[in-house]
Image (spheres, rainbow, N blue to C red):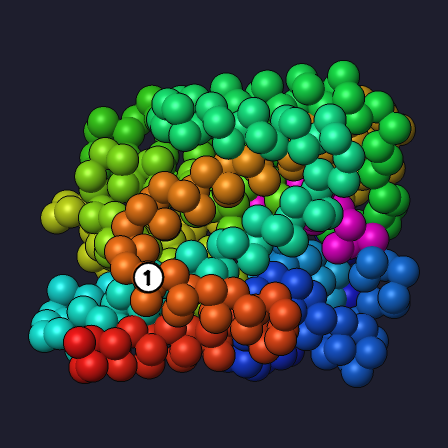
């Protein structure tokens, strides 16, 4: 299997620095990669990097982590890919796990206000994400109609099973209304020999079928099934994992809605991938499912589908682009995920976080920080937490 001139240790060191410093979400992460690995270290060229980004944006999963996984593999083979994933993910995962341990111990009005501020920043971040994704993924009237229909369906009858049906309906709608969509090219050489590409793809599909069947055998098997299914359906960006996980852990009352929203807000304040939110949720699950074991299983299960898919599809991508229907179906699914995220913006985020006019004002200013002033998520987090605490002290 191919690998570059580097070593897994080198990849681990470089991606650990990125994992400690890459604030700002998936788009910002891709900028960090380009500066550090394309311009400075020249691990890959501009054209190859752009093709990797295009491929990962068309697949379910966390695009920035998938790109990092591929870069690690191209640099140092399969162990380089694992080193890139572990180093980039571990800092944020540990921080989210520690936050999950801290939340039950927080008491008093100021601690409650700080947690409420994290909920408010989640509202602003997701609103910003919905608008940005809508501009990119629903550029025409047919796809906007698909997104609106998905929002209405999820608000009318929210259920994990309905999400699967809505995503499937989006793929069918894409075949009808997105016929002119094209998929960018990607490198023909790649992470795996094409003759072995079926291995990760078969494992990805096999786990999707097998994990629900064994979910009743052990609490951690149930955790793996929940988070693996969510990871397999995250088209369109990291924020889309929010409605998928909300339906899987909040609706069945495995995690309280306010805890879920506070954890999602905290995830905006740490570097590294947004999917590290899984470590918080896994640790917050009930006894037998949660704790350190739950955090590890949830984290790995959420990332696994996207990494397996990109490992298997990279060497086959040139064949995929020869089928226009594949691009049309993906375009329809992407329109659906805009609708799913819009539904999640209202429930659970708005319904659990917005209680007063002051909450609306705080969230609105955070939204302006993100969208108009483009200051990033960390200043928005600090604003919401400090403003929420100030309101508590003044009232």
Q: Which residue is mark 1?
A: 357
Where residue 19 appears, as percent x and y from the top left, is 53, 74
Which residue is found at the position 80% from the left and 73% from the top?
38
Residue at the location (48% across, 70% down)?
365
Query: Considering depth in this image, is 91 or 117 the residue closer to the camera?
Result: 117
Does 341 sit above or below residue 291? above
Residue 293, position as x, y percentages in the image: 25, 54
Q: Residue at x 20, y 39 (%)?
A: 253
Q: Is residue 269 above or below residue 324?
A: below
Q: Which residues are magenta?
A: 51-61
Was residue 55 drawn as part of the magenta stretch in this picture? Answer: yes
Position of residue 128 in the picture relative to residue 2 (left or right): left
Location of residue 29 by image quarter: bottom right
The answer to whether residue 364 is left or right of residue 387 is right
The main secondary structure of the magenta stretch is helix
Callout 1: helix, strand or loop? helix
Residue 232 makes an appearance in the image: no
Assess whether residue 164 is covered by the magenta stretch: no
Residue visible at 46% across and 38% down? 343
| Residue 120 seen | yes
Please name whichever residue, 169 or 274, is drawn nearer the observer in this view of the structure: 169
How many numbered markers are drawn?
1
Q: Position of residue 104 (x, y in %)?
A: 14, 64
Look at the picture and state if 327 lies above or below 238.
Answer: above
């Amino acid at each position: 299997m191919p690998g570059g001139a580097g070593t897994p240790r080198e990849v681990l060191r470089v991606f650990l620095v990125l994992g400690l410093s890459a604030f700002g979400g998936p788009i910002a992460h891709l900028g960090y990669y380009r500066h550090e690995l394309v311009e400075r270290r020249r691990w890959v060229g501009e054209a190859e990097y752009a093709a990797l980004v295009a491929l990962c944006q068309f697949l379910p999963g966390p695009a920035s982590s998938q790109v990092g996984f591929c870069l690690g593999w191209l640099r140092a083979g399969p162990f380089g890919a694992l080193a890139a994933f572990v180093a980039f993910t571990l800092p944020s995962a540990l921080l989210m796990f520690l936050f999950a341990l801290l939340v039950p111990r927080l008491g008093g009005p100021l601690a409650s206000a700080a947690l409420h501020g994290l909920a408010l920043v989640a509202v602003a971040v997701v609103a910003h994400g919905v608008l940005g994704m809508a501009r990119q993924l629903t550029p025409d009237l047919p796809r906007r109609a698909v997104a609106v229909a998905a929002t209405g369906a999820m608000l009318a009858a929210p259920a994990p099973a309905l999400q699967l049906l809505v995503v499937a309906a989006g793929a069918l709608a894409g075949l009808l209304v997105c016929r002119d969509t094209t998929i960018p090219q990607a490198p023909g050489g790649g992470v795996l020999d094409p003759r072995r590409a079926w291995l990760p793809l078969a494992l990805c599909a096999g786990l999707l079928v097998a994990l629900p069947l064994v979910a009743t055998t052990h609490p951690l098997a149930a955790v793996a099934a929940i988070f693996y299914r969510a990871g397999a359906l995250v088209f369109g960006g990291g924020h889309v994992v929010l409605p998928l996980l909300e339906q899987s852990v909040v609706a069945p009352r495995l995690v309280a809605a306010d805890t879920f929203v506070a954890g999602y807000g905290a995830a905006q304040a740490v570097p590294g991938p947004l999917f590290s939110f899984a470590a918080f949720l896994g640790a917050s699950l009930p006894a037998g499912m949660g704790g350190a074991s739950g955090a590890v299983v949830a984290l790995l299960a959420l990332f696994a589908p996207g990494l397996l898919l990109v490992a298997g599809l990279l060497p086959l991508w040139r064949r995929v682009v020869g089928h226009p229907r594949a691009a049309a179906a993906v375009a329809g699914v992407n329109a659906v995920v805009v609708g799913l995220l819009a539904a999640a913006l209202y429930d659970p985020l708005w319904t659990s976080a917005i209680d007063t006019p002051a909450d609306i004002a705080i969230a609105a200013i955070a939204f302006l920080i993100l969208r108009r002033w483009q200051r990033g998520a960390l200043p928005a987090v600090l604003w919401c937490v400090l403003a929420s605490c100030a309101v508590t002290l003044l009232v």
